[in-house]
Image (spheres, grey):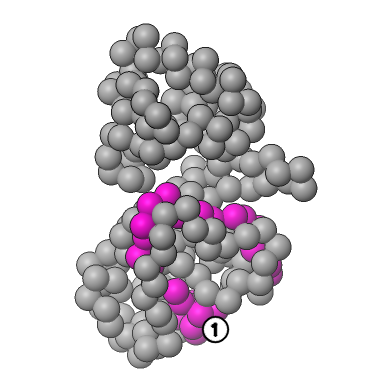
Amino acid sequence: MDQDFLNAFPRFNDSDILQKHIEQCQVQEVPEGTQILDIGSTIRVVPFVIDGAVKVLRSDDEGHELYLYHIQAGESCAMTLTSSLSRDQSQVRAVTLEKTRLLAVPVGVIHSWYERDPIFQTFVLSTFQQRFRELLTTLDNVTFQHIDKRLIQLLSDRTTALERNILHVTHQELADELNSSREVVSRLLKQMEKKGMVELGRNRIKILKLM
């Protein structure tokens, strides 16, 4: 089994069942900004992030997007696990935030692991619980929070996922994920800069103090 994968997912070290099927999986290096899953697509592999970060989104037919959560090293996508186990199509879009290395696990292997391995079952359930809490937070933000609070939360989430305080992102990209306009996001970022919360550059935001 790939040692970097085991370092990212240490709980799998004790699983003989996982190691029996690992030869069917493939380590992939994916460039920044690559879409690895799309809504309505057939799921053939489930990504397990070894290093890097991925953002997970929902979108409608008109191209409006809604940010759901990030996946970072040692994590997988709960929505993709759910869809693969139920043999459903993908319900989300997933895009790499930076150069990302992941283990692509075929859906058939996912089923075998889930049916036979208690360690993997526990991992799936804990992933569901974590993402469910994050989705509730997203729902609360969309329903109850103003756009400025949602922007702060999005910047905070991205900083945590990338483990750095300098984000290479456009105002339009943030606006798309918040289902808002670039003008509104730009105005809020300018206000945050005046308060000493961020430092703005061209397609660059340095996080100083969000909270």
Res. 81 in view: yes
176 shown above or below 16: above
85 shown above or below 22: above
Residue 39: image x %, image y %?
A: 67, 58
Question: Residue 168, located in which quarter of the rendered image?
Answer: top left
Q: Is residue 107 magenta?
A: yes
139 shown above or below 36: above
106 shown above or below 156: below
Q: Residues within 10 Å of mark 1 (few under 14, many from 20)?
A: some
Residue 129: image x %, image y %?
A: 48, 52
Magenta span of residues:
88-115
Residue 128: image x %, image y %?
A: 50, 56
In this orientation, which residue lies closer to the viewer: 9 or 133? 9
* Image position of 89 (left or right of 4): right
In this orientation, which residue lies closer to the viewer: 75 or 161? 161
Q: Residue at x 59, y 55 (%)?
A: 93
Q: Which residue is mark 1?
A: 108
